[in-house]
Image (spheres, helix red, strand yellow):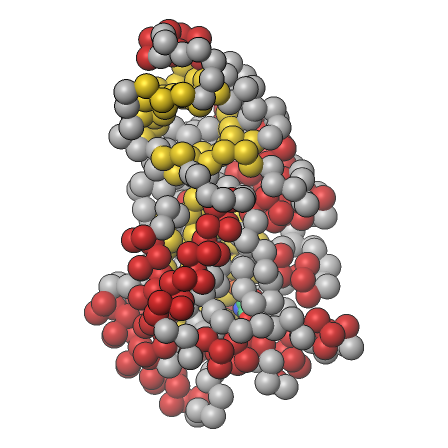
Amino acid sequence: MGVLILNCGEVAHMGSGDTTQPLVGAEMLDRESNIFPAGHGIMIQDSKFHIFGDSESLQSEFAPWWDGSEQISGDLAVVDAKGKAIIPGLVDSHTHLLWGGDRSSEMRLRQAGMTYRQIAEAGGGIAKTVLSTRSMSLSDLCRIGITRANQAVLTGTTVIEAKSGYGLETEAELRLLEAMKAIDDSSIVKLLPTWLGAHDFPYGRQRSEYLEELVNSQLPAVAEQGIAKWVDVFCEEGWYTNDETEYIVRASTEHGIPSRLHVDEFEDSGGLALAAELGSVSGDHAAKSSVESRQAASDNGTMQTFLPGTPYVLGKPLDSPLNQCIENNWAFSLATDYNPNCRILSMPFIGNLATTRMGLDPFAALVAATRNPSTTLDDPSINGTIVESGRADLNILWSQSVDGWCQTPGENPIVKTIIGGSIVNLDR
Ligand code: NIG
Ligand code: FE
């Protein structure tokens, strides 16, 4: 089935230059090179973007029978965008999608002054979620994952990176990764799995013993089954040291598994610098990283992925240096960090935090939510852009301006989503 979209408003195609590379610096503000003005049409065929052109010409060529209503004839569906803006499918490059249980009671602990680390030391945090996740079956995990993935699709996400990390033992970690594969196979969204066995140290185990289990048992099993695209480590004071992180990442590299890492969330431990040195595709959180680390990341092609939802729910300042990244031509992305503590699946809400709280230009925020994260995903079918021959993922907004993608924090800015050339039809 082909899809012909007529009467487009602005189209943020994001297609300037080499689309396998992120946009940086002034490029992130260059609307002229990355937005088609209103009046275009888009023809989708074989799940891919096929032709862009003047709306009226495309209509007379492909759908002369069109009478102005939303309509299917033969193998062509016509969608009237009614002058509304179009953006690429949103790419959420950092989530903890699969887990069970409930951590709502931690809010009162935070209000009483306890930090994330103190709550973890008191038996809350990741350890608590591990207990409730280990008891879930594969089908429990798939069911909850599909529900959450569909929820993300409703606000325009078409690609999701998802991490394990709430099993912390070989069998439970493998089950989480297996569930991700099943969800990817059976749902409309593209799900890309990351092994995060080093999310924490499991309760009651010797540190050194678990480290050896990670490298000598979990990693070989993950590699043998080919069910993770990346390895991740929670590299942070109080969790994994830089040496432990390096040990796990180097072992993974030997198995051909590249890394994306949690770094410098609460303090600067040199995690982003280490990610750069190890050639990680991304250093995530990077909230407290030094200027030198950020420059090293940029020099080594390591994306800085900012996760403003996490400081937001923890009641911390939203002060990651997004505009400093633009000034210095440092590549950066935005993602949700969806997890039991940060129940945000909406990329538009993250864009809202970045623009209203961190002063980022709304178009630059869109670049950081589409093309830039897609360049870390090593999948030629995903490019976070609307360009010829690319996989046909897009969103039609409520607004005529592409900036409308992130300006409705309590309402859904998306009116229609297309994934791989299929019009998404989920109950709202
Ligand atoms: O990225 N900081 C480490 N991991 C998650 C939180 C996990 C949790 O609290 O369950 C994060 O914020
Ligand atoms: Fe995270």
Residue 60 location (% of width, % of height): 37, 7
Residue 272 location (% of width, % of height): 51, 62
Residue 276 location (% of width, % of height): 45, 59
Left or right, residue 162 beside residue 355: left
Left or right, residue 122 beside residue 294: right
Q: Is residue 119 above or below residue 281?
A: below
So how many labels did they put on this image?
Answer: 0
Q: Residue at x 44, y 39 (%)?
A: 425
State which quadrant residue 362 falls in: top right
Quadrant where the C terminus is found in the figure:
top right
Q: Residue at x 51, y 14 (%)?
A: 39
Q: In front: 402, or 322?
A: 402
Q: Is residue 74 above or below residue 185?
A: above
Left or right, residue 11 beside residue 218: right
Residue 402 location (% of width, % of height): 58, 29
Q: Is residue 230 above or below residue 135?
A: above
Q: Residue at x 60, y 67 (%)?
A: 341
Q: Residue at x 33, y 49 (%)?
A: 378
Q: Is residue 95 above or below residue 268?
A: above
Q: In front: 18, or 358?
A: 358
- Residue farthest to the right? 112
Q: Is residue 3 visible?
A: yes
Q: Is residue 250 visible?
A: no
Quadrant of the displayed image that contains ligand 1: bottom right
Quadrant where the N terminus is found in the figure:
top left
